[in-house]
Amino acid sequence: MRSALERHVTLLLSILVSPERAVVLTLDEWDLAVRAARGARLLGVIRARLEHARLLGSIPAEVRAQLDGAWSAAAYRRQMVLREMWAVANVLEPLGIPLVALKGAAYIAQGLRCADGRLPEDLDLMVPRDRLDEAERALVDAGWASEKTDPYDQRYYRTWSHELPPMRFAGHPIELDMHHAILPPLGRVRPDARALFESAVPIPGSRFRALSPADQVLHACAHLFQDSDCAGRLRDLVDIDALLREHSAAPGFWTALLARARLHRLGRSLWYALRYGRAWLNTLAPEGVAAEVARLRPPALSRAAMDGLVPRALLPQSPDAEPACGTRLARFALFFRSMWLRMPPWLLAYHSIAKLVRSARRQPRAEAA
Amino acid sequence: MHADAALIWQLTDLPRTRVHRFGDEGLVFNPLSWETHLVSDPALRVVEVLASGPRREADLASELAAEGDEPDVASVRNRLKPLLDELRNLGLVSAHAGAP
Amino acid sequence: MNVGDLQLGEMLTTLAGRGLGLDVGAARARVRTDLPSLVATLQSVYRHFPVEHGEGFFDVTATVRHARGLRRFVRPQIEFVVDGEVPFEPFPAATDLPLLEWGLNWCLAERCNTYLLLHAGVVERAGAAVILPALPGSGKSTLTAALTVSGFRLLSDEFGVVRLDDGLCLPMLRPIALKNASIEVIARLRPDANLGPTFPGTRKGDVAHLGPDAASVAQRHEPAMARLIVFPRYEAGAATALEPVSRGRAFAKLAVNSFNYELLGPAGFEAVGRLIARCDCYRMSYGDLAEAMATIKGLLTAP
């Protein structure tokens, strides 16, 4: 896995990890870095890191303008998430339904540093499974509508998935994803949903709670390494690294993290996150836990496979090239893996065949005006 | 009705709510939704008054009645209620029960 | 050295390599293509732009190329590629400049968020900028084109770029896309106008592009203070009618006709507010271009 990284990746990673290196970049290098960052949806995060390091004044004006533009887009998205949370809480809180904010929405509501510069598209919320139907009815009554109208998709989500089909309030840019768990209920790895709720922490000034720091990190790891094909998901790894840095200072965090990883059976995802985080983002686990982390290590064959696939799939493609054949294969392989982990074999077969039989229609891209 | 009179209304986010008045109508920037509302009087006036600080509902009605030279404060209050409700639905204003 | 002075061979090499840099004022674009017809058209329409080679930092880097696979040969199609992504459906191979222009506009509208981007034509005369918001049925492009061949400087026909700190308008020079009858109208108005080739049968009918003139290009970094906002409405045969628009309504119409007003939040609100406060706002219906232009000139010289 120590193969050389492409230049645009090296540039991007170096700015993320050591912002002070950014001040010596040439305009050519900035051009490549900004294009790579934009494609990886990390441009706002780059600006946030440069600002934290008080280096914004030291970069060329034309580069600064693009970073500032990305920052404005992130600020808009942040506000739209807050607004969506306000609207949803107005509907669900009076019903006494416990509301747990997940992922980006939680980072924003909690004021975590890792929220800075992100571009959330969804509001991910978790409610207890036995309150989900009631929540959905209330939201529909209040004006939210399901985005997926295909009956197969609806059935798939409701029966087999850990979330409702996405919903949207007409005209709102943020989609609402209602979960009752953080991973599919029939999957090979089933985190303890009740434990997630029990350990959820209040968010000061908010009607929502958040997962405990350890659970929050594990959710991010699971989301990336269990539930996705890693395609272009460097930003998710950046989130995990940032969460670890933010929460590391709290005493007992790493002990809790490892204990919860065992409880939720998410040790493998955590191990991968630490491994690739260390390789690319200098993510460091404290020395004292190294032995425990090592115990989470997946079998050699799995490790080798992931080492071949994850770098190809997760790291951003060159802005000047098509995704290489190897990348597309890697993404497909990881996609298949995530589906495999999501469902028992009989369901996977049914789902694949059902998808094949329904004429696969590619989402139309933007039409020229 | 008495309970309502003690309701205290305020702009949800006073420092970030903005108003540009042009004659008897204007634009209000909603800091929660980042929407911009084209608002005419009296709703615009309500927002401007609350921008100077929270008001009890009864006092708000009296102030507006006085500004508009309207002796019938009760009637002003009746027209005020739906306006305030709508502003609240938009997230521009919020209300809480005042001290007795 | 301007783009128009290059040898065709050099153009081909530059565009097939690092790309051709185009400083359009408020933004810098880098264009790449290996389509010879597009190279020639670009040279024509952008002829007054100084040559910039494709090194350095650009706001957008775009490539127009043949679609992959069968569509390279069978009813050939071309694609717009930006940073490794193909965001739009392909176009027929013959409509290369429309695809490039449309794609670049889309990218610029999405990225240039340090400015307020109105969807409007903006022209300038005697130090005063006129903003012509692009509502449907406005005839904005034809009107903007006519003004720029009749003594007005072109800032843009698509992007009203407003600086957030001081409210000045900045040029974002784009070739003006004229449709159907408008092409002939402008050609007759100014026979030596820099009109590119006509692309028949696009989704919008026949399209031809009016290249920005030398003076506008030379002044592409000169901001201008907006004094006038005119909401045009074209109606064949109509007499020219001018009415003031209330500032409240003008604000609303301007905000609705913007690429990023909502995204900018409070900064957008303040920027439009300042603009409206400073400008006279009118609605103008017209059927005769000359009369419309005279009306606008008249508004600018009024005390």
Image (tube, coloured by chain):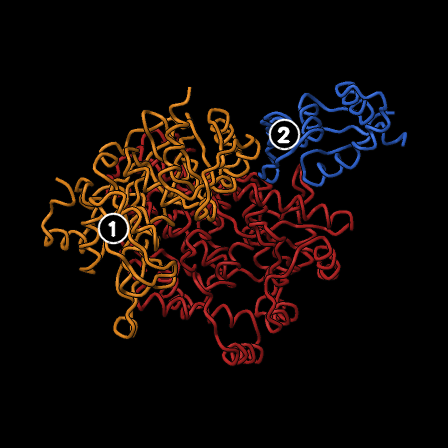
Front residue of this view, candidates C228 and C78: C228
Seen in the picture, residue C213 relative to A348 is either above or below; the reply is above
Front residue of this view, candidates B18 and B97: B18
* Residue where numbered disc 2 is placed: B25
The numbered mark 1 sits on a residue in which chain? C
Which quarter of the rendered picture does the C terminus of chain C lie within?
A: top left
| Residue C31 numbered mark, or none | 1
Under circle 2, the secondary element is: strand
The image position of residue C174, as x and y in percent, is 30, 44
Label 2 neighbourhood size at 10 Å, few (<14), some (14-19), many (20+)?
many
The numbered mark 2 sits on a residue in which chain? B
Which quarter of the rendered picture does the N terminus of chain C lie within?
A: top left
Q: Is residue C103 visible?
A: no
Chain B shade in the render? blue
Q: Which residue type carries mark 2? A: Glu
Q: Are marks 2 and 1 in contact (CB under 8 Å)?
A: no
Chain C shade in the render? orange
Which chain is red in the picture? A
